[in-house]
Amino acid sequence: MTVTYTARVANARFGGFSQLLLLWRGSIYKLLWRELLCFLGFYMALSAAYRFVLTEGQKRYFEKLVIYCDQYASLIPVSFVLGFYVTLVVNRWWSQYLCMPLPDALMCVVAGTVHGRDDRGRLYRRTLMRYAGLSAVLILRSVSTAVFKRFPTIDHVVEAGFMTREERKKFENLNSSYNKYWVPCVWFSNLAAQARREGRIRDNSALKLLLEELNVFRGKCGMLFHYDWISVPLVYTQVVTIALYSYFLACLIGRQFLDPAQGYKDHDLDLCVPIFTLLQFFFYAGWLKVAEQLINPFGEDDDDFETNFLIDRNFQVSMLAVDEMYDDLAVLEKDLYWDAAEARAPYTAATVFQLRQPSFQGSTFDITLAKEDMQFQRLDGLDGPMGEAPGDFLQRLLPSGAGMAAGGPLGRRLSLLLRKNSCVSEASTGASCSCAVVPEGAAPECSCGDPLLDPGLPEPEPPPPAGPEPLALIPGPVEPFSIVTMPGPRGPAPPWLPSPIGEEEENLA
């Protein structure tokens, strides 16, 4: 039976694990006491021979051997190889438990998809779950010694009710030299297809869901078979075992207490019993014993899986779910919190203190900032109000002059820059684009020429004047970035032109 001590360590307190040290069943003492007594017996025998049997010359030679073994025993990487080995075994042990075939998901799908309250529908559901349980029994019988002792032959499986005699004939007549744990899963699939043809399973989607859950169940059975087949590589186990045994064989000699009168380094004390060497043996050999117990959890050790218990539990609950609980519903009624705006279950006197604790809002919920640190700042790091347009800032930054006129390259490039910055406000549009003075009766032309909008095109030459009388600059003070251009033919606006400016040019045209 698995040793469970979870309730004893539910709360961390002073000396919480100390009460676990006195447990015998499933403990390290039960696993290791024989090896520890053997090690101590050999050590004391060598110590007695050194003190009372050997001659003086033999004692000097033995002392040199002790110093040699103590010096070079540390070259064996016991902790390194043991650490990796035990980590591998523990991960494998837990993965094997996760592969135990549990029918809970499958039985829920069977109860929800295979319909019929008559004996025929009941027979379908019970037979489907019996096939699933039979597949689990067959695979566990192949990997677990406890289950094999319970069902040593197929006759025992038939007598236990997992298989009928007709099914046994079909099972044994199937000519295959491999493990046939998968045969009941095929029977399950065939029976589910027959139930679909009879209308017990109402649509193909329900049949698909049922077979998908069966495949998950069958996959876990297959993984148990592969875990039993593919072991931890033997060379790894041999390396760890040889490293541990050779290390403590060297410690039997190298950890002997020598005569303090000889003046050997680090041998000033004679205690006869190597306390710390025994502790080291307890830890390292106990570590290896943990791996020995967990490497095959389907045996009969104290902490091995309770496979027979799982077979009984799974068979009982699966039959209850698909038979007695099929279409079994309680009367629908309003719950206790039907009219409550905020539903909350009550607390007992032992847990009411948790109600007074504030709910968790996030790790930054209680952070406070100074008022000046909460003010928004400009993203570009420049001074100025947040609402100022980039074009207005460029107008204040750059001086106006002859270069800003229509014929100057700086004016044309700044006009392009302002257009591409998407300054769609009236102020930026008026500052970046002005119309030329034209004769009376002619259509006004905007100064934002289309060739400047394409940076890949060369700068165009100013077009010749349309009439004998040339155009002049607007009299009076010229606003910054205001330019005058000559009227000329205009093409359609490029597709990447911002829509407000494009609409304005269409209206001007």
Image (spheres, rainbow, N blue to C red):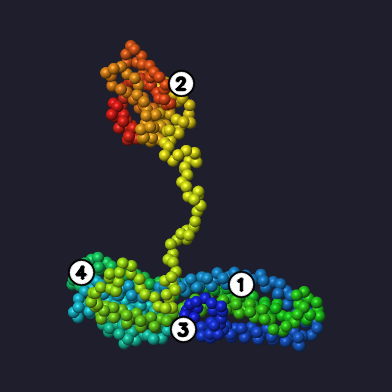
How far is disc 2 from disc 1 in space, using C-alphas?
A: 87 Å
Kindly identify which residue carries mark 2: 402
Badge 1 density bin: few <14, some 14–19, many ≥20, Cα 10 Å: many
Viewer can see residue 106: yes
Pinpoint residue 188: horizontal percent, then vertical percent. Answer: 28, 74
Pointers 3 and 1 in contact (C-beta within 8 Å): no
- Alpha-carbon span between mark 4 and mark 3: 46 Å
Task: Judge depth for marks 3 and 2 and give the one in front.
Answer: 2
Badge 1 is on which residue? 78
Q: Which residue is mark 3?
A: 300
Task: Write down the residue under mark 4.
Answer: 202
Is the residue under label 2 in contact with that under label 4 (CB below 8 Å)?
A: no
Q: Amino acid at mark 4?
A: Arg
Q: Position of residue 367 (x, y in %)?
A: 49, 57
Q: Nearer the viewer, mark 4 or mark 3?
A: 4
Residue 333 in the figure: left or right of residue 430: left
Q: Does residue 497 appear to the left or right of 70 in the view shown?
A: left
